[in-house]
Each structure stands twice: as structure tokens, then as C-alpha cells.
Image (spheres, coloured by chain):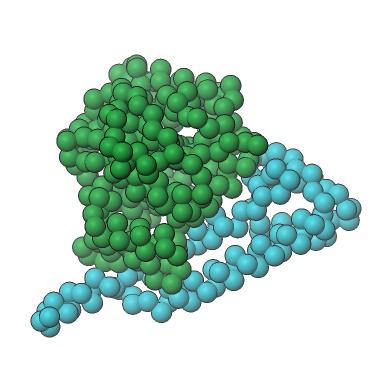
Amino acid sequence: MSEAEILVEQIKLSTDFQTNKIILREKILTDLHLTYNGGLFKITPELIAFAATWPDDNMFLEDVYQNPIELKRAEFLKQAQQHYQKVMNTWHCEHAELKKLRKL
Amino acid sequence: MVNTGVVMFAFNTQTVDYVEIAARAAKLITHTLNLPTTLITDIEPASSIKSRFDQVVISNSGLDNRRIGQFESGSEWKNGNRFNAYDLSPYDTTILLDSDYLMLDTSLLTITTMVNDYQIMNDNRVLSTTETQYNMGITSLPYIWATAVVFRKTAKAKMLFDLVGRIQRNYQYYYKLYQVDHDNFRNDYAFTIANRMLNGYATEKTCSMPFKMLTVEVEVESISKHKNMLIIKDKKTAYAVPTQNMHVIDKQYLLSNDYLLFLETLCQD
């Protein structure tokens, strides 16, 4: 392979970190969704904090489809925390991997 | 037990073997979702193709159309008859997909467990741009994407598909009413108009999927897997995206040997 051809191959391998970062974030926002008792929730720090501080064992929360869903607070909180931790961990790992790739 | 499956429409044209693209998509669907697949096509396919689906339904393409856009502009486009998906689907809950939609994650499976009548892809991310909202015309409404529709057999879902049929049959009226840029029929627009009518002419998001679709609109040279990411290369650059569902516009790539090899590697994992 000539020097010019090698250069062309290398340029083709280059990638735009900012575009990749946005697409990765959007995939993570998809992955943050959790089903519970027939509802679909996007797990956010606010949702976890709200569930953690609610004083009763049973509660109702609006899901992404605007339905009120009955929750067993402790059970939901545990699932939400575990799900959030797993997805954020994936985000961190994949973000670190993106940074290693060649940039434009 | 609710019977859930995937339905794809594929009508071959003189330039594109859509049935082969659908057969390749079915392999990925089986691997990723482990759901049965049904092909709806206009000509009895060869037994080697039939064996790649759980069911094949013969139905006419319903419309002679021409493509407008970056790929294969002016070429034949048999995109009618989608409104019959409600009647032709053998499933209680159906994931209706374009054959160029690659099933690489399980997010749509989550959607099938919800009790909504139907859900349509509302937001789209095109790989190489930052634009995420698309209108049917300069003075028209934003449109949704019929690329992926999840529906259950309910009265409201039936009404949606009946409306799409009415819009297809009277498209010359509706495209003018909604000030759509082009008069060639497009399912995205028909579903947008039907969805709007069905929801009281309001921008109603409860029938929308709560996440974005990724569309690869570039001319693809290769797709490969790198750890948990996919590296998509075009002639100028490469994109590193997480492994996720993708709408790939480049049909020639979907028919290439490179894609076939990528598919086989993925399905071995």
C-alpha cells in the first residue's frame, strides 16, 4: 500500500467526537426507561430523589404515557436505583471508549 | 398469552431486491428479539426466502410511486398498502417495520408490553446532522416516522390504519390540504395526518415512542463492531455509535456482501 493510500485509510478512520457523543447520549436516554406495573418510566435523579423521600409505602406516579401508575415505593426505588446505576455505568464506559477513538 | 410478532412489507422493484433486504432484517429480528416474523409481498417468493420468515402473506403493492430524495431518486417505489397491516398481521401485538430498519437492541420489545393502542416513532436523529425535526413542507407540520409502528388489535388502532388507507386513496386532496412539499405518496406523511386527525387535530405525544430513532442517511461503505459500539464508515468519515436500532437508507449497502458478513458476525455473538 502506498503512502497516499495509507493516509486515505487513516482519514477514513477519523471520527467526530461531538457527533458520537450526542448519539451515545440519546441511546442512554432510551436505555434509562424502565417498565414497572404496566407503566414506563424514564429514570432520572429527580425521580429517584422523589421516590426516596416520599413518606408512604404506596404511591402513584405519572409515567411517560401520562398514566397514573401505582407503585410499591421501596420496590420501585430499588429497581430504579439499580437500573440507573447500570445505565450510567454503561454510559461512562462507552464515553471513555469514544474518547480513545481518533478525532477529526 | 399475547401473541407478538414483527411484520414487514417488501415489494421488489427493478432496481432493489426489497424481499432480500427484509429476509436479512428478519434474521436480525430473530437474533435480537426472538419474535416471529411475517413478510407481506406481492409475488410468491422462492422457498429459500420463505424459509427465512415464519409466515409469508401475498398482497398487492397497491400503488405505483416514484422516489424523491438522495437515494435512487426517480426510481420505482412500491410503498402502498401499508394500511392493510392491521388486517394482514397475524399477531395480537405487531411491530410493523420498514425492511431497512436494523433491529440491534430490545427497546421496541419494551414498547410491546405497554397497553397503548399504537405507538409511532416521533423523533429521528439523522447520523450526520444536528437537525431533529422534519416538516412535511415549509408551511406544513412536523412529521412522524412510519418506519417503526407498534400496534395492538384495538378499535383505535384499526381507525388509524383505516384513515391511512383513506389518505392514500385521496392523497391528491390531503397533500394539498396539509401543504406537503411533494405529491408522491409517503407513509410517514399519511401516518402523521391520520394520527393528528385521530387525536383531535392536536399534537398528541401519547401515541409516540418515548425515544429517538437513528437514521443512517449516508452512503455506507461498511459497518463493523468495535467492542460495544458500531463503526459506520462512509466515503469521508467514520461514526462510532452505540449498538442500537438503526434505519439505514442505503439499500445497495443492505444488499452488499459486507453487510451480509456483518450480519453473520453479529448473529454468532
Reply above or below: B214 against B151.
Answer: below
Q: Quadrant of the C terminus of chain B?
A: bottom left
User: How many numbered marks are there?
Assistant: 0
Residue at left 37%, top 42%?
Answer: B51
Tell me which chain appears cyan: A
Which residue corresponds to the image point at 45% horizontal and 61% vertical from the top-left?
B243
Residue B14 screen position, x and y as percent: 17, 36
Q: Quadrant of residue B189?
A: top left
Colour chain B is painted in? green
Asked if residue B89 lies left or right of residue A66, the reply is left
Q: Where residue B37 sits in the image (x, y, percent)?
A: 45, 40
Q: Position of residue A4 (x, y in %)?
A: 12, 79
**A58 vs B155: above or below:** below
Picture quadrant of residue B236: bottom left
Q: B210 or B84: which is nearer to us?
A: B84
Q: Residue at x 24, y 35 (%)?
A: B12
Instruction: Give the quadrant of residue B231.
Output: bottom left
Q: Is residue B198 left or right of residue B2?
A: left
Q: Nearer the viewer, residue B117 or B137?
A: B117
Depicted B198 relative to depicted A5: above or below? above
Identify which residue, B206 or B96, lies in the foreground: B96
